[in-house]
Image (cartoon, grey):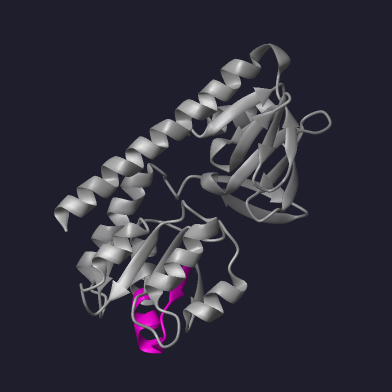
């Protein structure tokens, strides 16, 4: 899990980071952090879909957390944003940008742990589920949500592309990786030897599947309509789940 913490107070960032490290250790999760002291600094380096979660302070010098959140949503509608705040005054604005939740400052262990539990359960993502392999004599652990595409190369080899654009050339059969990823409903076989993470699909056109990273993959001709319908059903299902979750959160708060 790659986590961003945006807060203009270093002590607050350290509190959140320490609690998240404790949560990760308790739940056998691998986490990494990027910390930012302002919304401006964060946005200067931000690229969509870089982070698993963004913790965002509402009251900061310069650009507010609400303004920063709105800028995030211009290009990234999916990454969960969790607001850090000393006041509930702006919660209406926070939820208008589909914030997942908020945590009162200073962050308290019980609330943060519950928030993380809810997030993991809502996303139906087991972040501990990783694809473990060796590439260029280095061991890698790639979380399932970070896998964008898998396609066969030469015999018994695969090319795996992750969300950051890295391509891993590994020795594994296509059937073996299909078995490994089978429990995760986001992966769709669009052609012989091509597996795509539906979270990264932009559209289908002219018998081609277009991804957010600009890559294009051919779709099996006889199953073009069926393949596109599966993706559409997945998207509708995800939207409905998000609406139900936002309704639950809004009703709760």
Residue range of the region highlighted in magenta in the rendering: 1-16
- Please identify the quarter of the rendering in which residue 196 is found: top right
Question: Where in the figure is residue 158, as x and y percent of width and height?
Answer: 74, 36
**Residue 4 on the magenta segment:** yes
Q: Position of residue 210 (x, y in %)?
A: 68, 37
Name the residue nearer the viewer: 102 or 191. 102
Q: Is residue 1 visible?
A: no
Residue depicted at 66% across the width and 56% down the height? 164
Residue at (42%, 44%) from the top-left corner? Answer: 125
Viewer-closest of 101 and 203: 203
Q: Residue at x 39, y 32 (%)?
A: 237
Q: In which quarter of the image is the C terminus?
A: bottom left
Which residue is depicted at the point 60% across and 63% down?
A: 47
* Residue 102 horizontal side relative to residue 69, left or right: left
Which residue is farthest top? 222
Q: Position of residue 204 (x, y in %)?
A: 65, 30
Q: Is residue 222 left or right of residue 110?
A: right
Vertical order, 244 against 182 (above or below): below
Of 246 and 168, which appears nearest the observer? 246
Q: Nearer the viewer, residue 25 or 142?
A: 142
């Amino acid at each position: 899990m790659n986590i961003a913490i945006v807060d203009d107070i270093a002590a607050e960032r350290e509190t959140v980071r320490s609690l998240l490290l404790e949560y990760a250790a308790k739940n056998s999760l691998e986490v990494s952090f990027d910390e930012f002291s302002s919304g401006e600094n964060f946005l200067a380096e931000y690229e969509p879909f870089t982070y698993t979660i963004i913790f965002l302070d509402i009251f900061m010098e310069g650009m507010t957390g609400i303004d920063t959140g709105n800028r995030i949503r211009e290009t990234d509608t999916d990454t969960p944003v969790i607001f850090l705040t000393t006041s509930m005054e702006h919660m209406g604005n926070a939820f208008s940008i589909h914030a997942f939740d908020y945590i009162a400052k200073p962050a308290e262990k019980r609330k943060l742990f519950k928030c993380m539990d809810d997030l993991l359960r809502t996303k139906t993502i087991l972040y501990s589920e990783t694809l473990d392999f060796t590439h260029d004599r280095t061991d890698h652990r790639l979380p399932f949500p970070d896998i964008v595409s898998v396609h066969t190369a030469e015999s018994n080899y695969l090319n795996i592309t992750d969300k950051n654009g890295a391509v891993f050339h590994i020795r594994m059969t296509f059937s073996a990786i299909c078995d490994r990823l089978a429990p995760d409903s986001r992966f769709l076989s669009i052609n012989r030897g091509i597996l795509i993470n539906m979270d990264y699909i932009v559209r289908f056109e002219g018998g081609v599947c277009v991804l957010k990273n600009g890559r294009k993959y051919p779709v099996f001709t006889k199953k073009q309509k069926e393949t596109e319908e599966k993706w559409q059903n997945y998207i509708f299902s995800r939207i409905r789940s998000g609406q139900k979750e936002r309704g639950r959160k809004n009703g709760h708060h």
